[in-house]
Image (cartoon, helix red, strand yellow):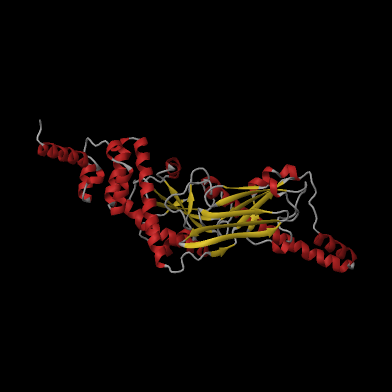
Amino acid sequence: MAHPLELLLLGLFLRALATKASLGAVDSEEAALEFLAKADLDITSAVVGEDVEQLVHRGWHDAVQALVARSQKTSDEVAQKVAALVRHAVYAERKALDDLVRALDRNYGKAVEVNPAMQWAQNSTHVFIAVKFAQRWNAPGALEVENTTVDFTGCCFNFTAFGEHSFIRRRYHLSFEFFRKITPSASSWFLASAGRVTVVIAKASVANWPRLFSSAEAQPKNLGTWLDMKAKWQSDLEKLPVEKSESKKSESKKAASAPAAKEKKAGSKNKKAKRKESEEEADEDEVDREVELLSDCPTSAYVGTSVAELCDKTFRGVVENPAVKSRRWLVEMYSSTGTGDLEAMKKLMPMMKRLADVFPSMAPGGRVGAVDCGVDKELCKRLGATKLPQIRRFSGSASGSEWHGGTDASMEALATWGSGKDEL
C-alpha cells in the first residue's frame, strides 16, 4: 500500500503536469511565447477563453498576436475560434477600462437629453418609423439602450430609452402628435439593428399623409425619409390622393382671393422655395441612402468613431459609385486578424480617427472610411491592397489612387492629398 506522503507527492506531480499544459498557468509573457511556439501544441485543447482573457488582462499583447498567428496557420476553423475569443476578451477588458474612466466623471449617470434622429415612410394603412440613438442620422450614437418605454395613444407617440455614447449617458426621448388618428392596439415596435428601433403605426383610416407630424412647424430637422420602405410602398400610395391639412386649405382660399399680380409674385417665390427645398431634400436623401448602406457592414476596430466602416457588400454603392454625388473618400485598408504591419496600423489608427473629424471641413463632401481586409479579403484583393496598411482616395472611381507618402505622414498632408488639391 502506498505511503500517504507518496500519494501526496504523486498528486502534486500530476497537478503540475496538468497546469504546465495550460496557457493560463504561465507566469510571464516570455513563458507564454515559448508555450505557443511548441511544435506539438494543440491550440483547441490547450487554449480556452479564460486563458485569452488573462493574456489580454495582463497586457501580453505580443503573446496574443503570437496566438492569433499560430491559429491562422492551423485552420480557418481554429483561426475563427481564436479570433472570437480575442474579440470577447478585448471587449471585456475595454469595458472594465471604460468603467474606470467613467468613475473619474462625477457627473456620470446624469443623462443628457437627446432628440433622436428618425426616418419615416408609409403605405395606405401603416406608418413605418426608424429611430436611431443619435442626434443626427449620419452620426455615431449609442449601440445599446436600456429602460426602453414606448407608449401609443390615439393621437400621439412617446418613446424614452437610456444609452451611452462617448462616455456620456444619454436619455433619448420622443413625444409628438401624428398627422391623423392612429390605432394604438394595432401598433407595435421592436429593436432592430444595433443602435436602432423600428416602430410600426396603424392608421385609424386608409389615407396618404403629407407628413408625419400634426403640424409642419413641429417636424424636427433630424426627421428624414426612409427610402427603401418608401420605394417598397410607392405603388400602394399612388392609388390615393395626398390628404390636405386644414392650414393648406386656408392658404388655398387666401391665394384665390388675392390680386393676380400678387398671386403671380407669390407663385414665383413659392417655386423658388420649392426648388430650393427639393434640392435640399435630394441631398438629405442621398446621405440617408448612404447611411442605410453603411449600416449593412459589420462593426470592427473603428466602431463608435467618425470613421465609416466599409465592406464588400456596399463598397460599390457607397464609395465607387457614391450615393452622395459630391462624396470624396479617404479610405484605410487594414487588418484586425494579425496580418500586415501591426505597428504601423496601431500608430495610424488614432490619426485616422482625428482625420475623420476634420476632413469633411477641409474637403467638400469628404469622409474617412476603413476596410478590414482580414474580413473582406476579396475586396482588398480587387483594390490591390496586398500590403497593409494602405490608404486610397476615391472620388467616384472604381479603384481610386494609392497614397505613397508613408503611414507616418502628417494629418494635414493626408487631408490635402485626399481632397485632391495636389492635382491642381
Q: Is residue 144 visible?
A: yes
Residue that lies at the very extreme toward the top in this rendered image: 1
Q: Is residue 185 above or below residue 265?
A: above
Count of marks, rendered view: 0
Report whether 325 appears left or right of 389.
right
List x then y, in percent, for residue 160. 59, 58
Q: Residue at x 38, y 39 (%)?
A: 80
Q: Is residue 410 visible?
A: no
List x then y, in percent, for residue 110. 50, 66
Q: Residue at x 35, y 46 (%)?
A: 86
Q: Is residue 231 above or below residue 354?
A: above
Q: Is residue 361 above or below residue 190?
A: below
- Residues 267 and 136: in front is 136
- Residues 306 and 344: in front is 306
Q: Quadrant of residue 172?
A: bottom right
For the N terminus, give its image quadrant: top left
List x then y, in percent, for residue 115. 60, 61
Report whether 1 appears left or right of 48.
left
Q: Residue at x 46, y 65 (%)?
A: 108
List x then y, in percent, for residue 129. 64, 51
- Residues 109 and 34: in front is 109
